[in-house]
Amino acid sequence: MTRPRLLLVALAIVVAAATRLPRLSHPLTPDEAGFLIVGRGWSSAGAQLYGAQWVDRPPVLIAVFRFAEEAGGLYALRLIGVLAAALTVLFAARVAVRIAGHGAAVPAAWAAALMVATPVVANGRVDGELLAAPFVLAGLSAAVAALAPEISARQVLIRASLAGVAGLTAMMIKQNFVDVAVFAAVAGLVALLRREIDWPRSRLLVVGFVGGAAAALAVILLWSWSRGTSPIELYEALYPFRIEASRAIDEGAAAVIERRSALRLALVLGGAVPLTVIALPLLWRRGTAAVWGMVAVVAFGLFSVAAGGSAWLHYLVQLCGPVAVLTGVAAATYRIRGRLAIAAGLILVLVAGVVTQIELPDRPTQLTRERSGEAIAAVSDPGDSIVVFPYGANIAYASGLDTPYPYLWMLPAIVRDTDLSTLGGLIRGENPPTWLVLTTQPDRWPNYGFTGPTDLLDGRYAEVGELCGRPVYLMRDADRAAPVDPCA
C-alpha cells in the first residue's frame, strides 16, 4: 500500500478514536453501569448466572467489563471503546484490501470511521455491539484469506481456524453476532459451486473453521464454569430467554414505536441503507465468493437489527464494519459515477452526524441519575446496600453500594420475577437493602407486565424524599440523613 493511502487510513483511525475522547467523562448509561456491576461481582460464590447478578449476555462481554471495572471503571471502559472503534476501522480496511486490493482501503476505512463515530448510531457509549465489531472483522479477514486459491492446505487450515476463533469470540460478546459463520457458509458455498475451490479444500475450510470455533468455545465455557457460570444456564440465558423476552416486549408501547421510527431514520442517516444500496451492483460487477459472502453478512445484519424487539439505536453498530467493507470494495470497482455516489453517501453520514450533534446534544438524564446515586452515597454508611427498581443501574453504580437484587434491567425482571417474589423475598428477608429507589411508581408496575403486589415497601420502608423525581426509601430502623436532591 502506498504511503498516502496508509496516511489516509491512519487519519480515519484517528478520527474514529478522537470523536470518542470528548465523551470519556460522560455519565455511564444504564447498560454500561449494569455490566460494570455484573463484572465486579462475578464469582463462583453467588447463586445467579454471574455471581450475585443475572443478565442475558455472554461471558466474554462480562469479562471485558470486569477488566474495565478493575482498571478504573468509567475512564477505563471508555478507553476500551476508543480502542474498539479504532480497530474496527483498521480491520474494515484490511478486509476490503483482501477482497479488492489496496484501492479499497481508504474508502473502507473512512466509511467505518464515519459510521462508528456518528452520534446518529453510537454517541460514545460502549456496549456489546462495539466490542464485538473488531472480532467480527478479524474473523472476516481470516475467512477471506482462507479462500485464496494460491495458499497451501496448511495455510487454509490455519486461516479457517483463526476465522472460527474470532467469530466465536464475537458471539461470546454479543450472541447474535454470527456474521463470520454467515460469511463462511455463503462464501464457501459460492466458491464451491463456481469451482473456485474443490471438495478437499472445502473440507479443510469446514474442519478448520469448526475446529477453531469449537476450541474457542471450550476454553471460554470452561473458564466461565470455573467462575461459577454453568454452560447450561448460560445457554438458557443467551437463547431460550431471549425468545421468551421478545414476547414480553410491548411492541405497541409508545416508547417502542418511537424508537422504531428513530431506528428506521438512523438506518438511512447512519449510512447503512444508502451505502448498501450503492454497493449492491457489486454482485454482478465483481460477483466473487467474498462479495456474495459480505452481502449476506449485511443482509443478516439488517435482519438482526429488525428482529431486535427493543429497537435501540446501538443495534446498528453491527452493520458498520460489513457495510464499510462493501463500500471500500465498491469504490475500488466502480468508475467515476459510482465513486461519486459513494462520496455522496459518506457526506450524508457526515452531515447527519454533525447536525445531530448540534441539534440534539446529550440529554441530562444520565447526569441526573449519576448525581442521584452520589447523593445516596454521601449519606450512606459502610455496609449499606441499594436496589434501584425496575431499572436504572447507573444510579446503583454511582452510589457505590452493593445491590443484592439480581436483575438490574427491567426485561429480565419482568420475565424472571413477574410476580415479584424475588424482590419481595429480599425486602422481607434477613438482609434487606438499606435503600430503595423507584424509577417508576408501584401503581404502574402492572402496566409493564408485573403481576406481584405493589405494596411491597409498606411497613418496612419509609419514603425519605425524591431524587430528580424518583422516590427514595430507607429502612425504618436505619438511622441515616435524607439524601439531598441534586435537581432541587
Image (spheres, helix red, strand yellow):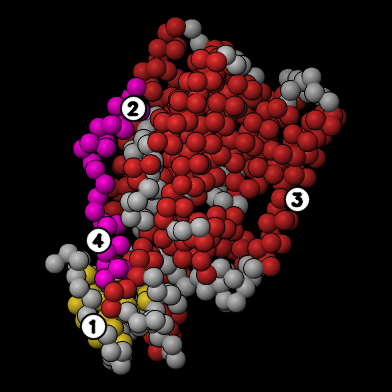
Q: In the rendered image, which residue does mark 2 sit on?
A: 350
Residue 221 at x, y percent in the picture: 69, 60
Q: Label for residue 215? A: 3
Report the residue marked by disc 1: 481
Q: CA distance from mark 4 to mark 2?
A: 30 Å
Secondary element at image label 3: helix
The foreground one among 112 and 7 is 7
Q: Label 2 to label 1, Cα distance in Å?
A: 50 Å
Mark yes or no: residue 412 visible: no
Tell me whether circle 4 and circle 2 mark residues in contact (CB < 8 Å): no
Q: Where residue 368 is drawn, which disc sits there? A: 4
**Which residue type carries mark 4?**
Thr
Coordinates of residue 175 in the picture (x, y in percent) = 57, 51
Please, what is the dominant secondary structure of the magenta stretch? helix
The CA distance from mark 4 to mark 3 is 45 Å
Residue 343 image offset from top left, x and y in percent: 39, 17
